[in-house]
Image: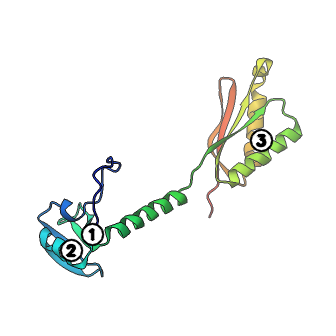
């Protein structure tokens, strides 16, 4: 039988109700083997769980009548936590990486930056290609657009354009995302 520790704070507002905390008059019960016991009064189901030395756990509170299962609450809580951690681990975190270019970028620097961009894309990250103008470079905005479009064309085999190259003040930016695997 599980016991409650009332000293701790209420970390989880939506907790699974067990044993005497189930305040519904009638519930649908499944025993520890997974067999349906049918709809019965809550106090009778609780007594049956107590006879087995287990807990009465509310599995589906929104069902009519609520679905409860006779099981070991500690084991149930452990399994839930394990599932939650597994889901969190399998969740893909995509980041927005940025590769910065300049109008007068040298060829080797350009190739290195494109190589880094490819690494980011292969890791599944989104990449923001940005080119900044300074001083007199503002007069050559067309060169900036050409450089960004060249990057888009050279990486077209592994990327798709999420946001086309466009000028925003002193910057020309484009956002590239990995192509979907087929």
- Foreground label between 3 and 2: 2
The structure residue drawn at horizontal position 23% and vertical position 80%, both measured from the top left corner, is 36
Q: Residue 79: where, in percent of width, then height?
A: 41, 67
**Looking at this view, is 41 or 180 the one in front?**
41
Q: Point out the tag, 1 or 3, that comes first from the N-terminus.
A: 1
**What is the crowding at mark 3: few (fewer than 14 residues within 10 Å), some, or many (at least 20)?**
few
**Label 1, label 2: how many angstroms apart (C-alpha)?**
7 Å
Return the residue nearer the eye: 23 or 178: 23
Residue 16: % across, % down? 29, 60
Q: Position of residue 70 (x, y in %)?
A: 26, 74
The location of residue 149, given as percent across then percent down, is 74, 39
Q: Which residue is at 57% across, 51% downward?
A: 93
**Which numbered disc flags the more N-terminal residue, 3 or 2?**
2
The residues tagged by marks 1 and 3 sit, at their Cα atoms, a distance apart of 68 Å
- Tags 1 and 3 in contact by the CB under 8 Å rule? no
Residue under the image location 41 percent in, 65 percent down: 78
- Quarter containing the C terminus: bottom right
Residue at figure coordinates x 24%, y 63% from the top left? 18
In the rendered structure, find residue 150 and report the number of the disc placed on it. 3
Residue of label 1: 1
Placement of the N terminus among the 4 image quadrants: bottom left
Answer with the quarter of the image where residue 24 lies: bottom left
Task: Please tell me the numbered disc located at residue 154.
Answer: none
* Residue pointed to by mark 2: 50
Callouts 1 and 2 close, C-beta under 8 Å: yes
- SS for callout 1: loop
Is 139 left, or right, of 179 in this rendering?
Answer: right
Report the Cα–Cα distance between label 3 and label 2: 72 Å
- Give whichever of discs 1 and 2 has the lower sequence position: 1
Q: How many marks?
A: 3
Q: Residues within 10 Å of mark 1 (few under 14, many from 20)?
A: some
């Amino acid at each position: 039988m599980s016991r409650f520790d009332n000293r701790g704070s209420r970390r989880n507002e939506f907790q699974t109700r067990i044993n005497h905390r189930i305040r519904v008059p009638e519930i649908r019960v499944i025993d520890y083997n997974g067999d349906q016991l049918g709809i019965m009064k809550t106090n009778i189901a609780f007594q049956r769980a107590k006879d087995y030395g287990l807990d009465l756990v509310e599995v589906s509170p929104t069902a009519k009548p609520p679905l409860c299962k006779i099981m070991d609450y500690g084991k149930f809580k452990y399994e839930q936590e394990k599932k939650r951690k597994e889901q969190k681990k399998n969740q893909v975190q995509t980041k927005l990486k940025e590769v910065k270019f300049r109008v007068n970028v040298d060829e080797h620097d350009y190739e290195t930056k494109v190589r880094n961009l490819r690494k980011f894309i292969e890791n599944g990250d989104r990449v923001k290609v940005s080119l900044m103008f300074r001083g007199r470079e503002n007069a050559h905005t067309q060169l900036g657009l050409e450089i960004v479009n060249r990057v888009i064309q050279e990486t077209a085999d592994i990327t798709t354009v999420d946001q086309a190259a466009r000028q925003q003040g002193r910057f020309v930016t484009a956002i590239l995302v990995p192509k979907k695997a087929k």
